[in-house]
Image (spheres, rainbow, N blue to C red):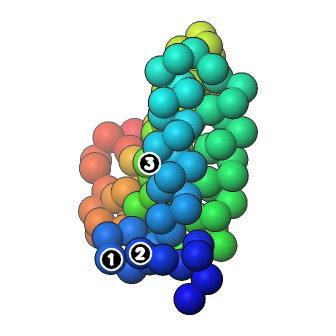
Amino acid sequence: AEEQDLGAGLVIASPRAWALTAKAMARRERDEWADAEELIERALAETAARGDLETESWALGSKAQVYCERGDLEAGLALALRQLALVADFEGQLPDFIHQ
């Protein structure tokens, strides 16, 4: 197996995407928003390539937080709702307020 595949399927489909997301979270906490966004975009590309919906939802949530912390609440809310819809889709349920 290639190094990027090590650990895949144990809990998440892409350990690399999860590592990028975790690193982005740390950068976000340090108000390094540009670095956080770049890491999140790399994570999202990886999750798309691997079909890793769980890690994609974490990355979207982190990106939503970056937007909100920068003051772009509308974009942050839109991403948070996209994240919620993604989670609901792979969990098989969609909360009623999403339809409103």
- Callout 1 amino acid: Leu
Of badges 2 and 3, nearer the viewer stands 2
Question: In the rendering, at what x and y percent does residue 33 appear?
Answer: 64, 23
Name the residue at the top extreme: 71
Q: Which residue is mark 1?
A: 10
Q: Secondary structure at mark 2?
A: loop
Front position among marks 1 and 3: 1
Q: Can residue 44 be seen at all in this image of the molecule?
A: yes
Q: Earlier in the sequence, mark 1 or mark 3?
A: 1
Residue 13 pos. (x, y %): 45, 73
Crowd around label 2: few <14 · some 14–19 · many ≥20 (10 Å): some
Q: Read off the residue under disc 2.
A: 7
Tag count:
3
The image shows residue 57, relative to residue 38, as above or below, that is below
- Residue appearing at x 52%, y 46% in the figure: 21
Which quadrant does the N terminus fall into?
bottom right
Residue hosting label 3: 58
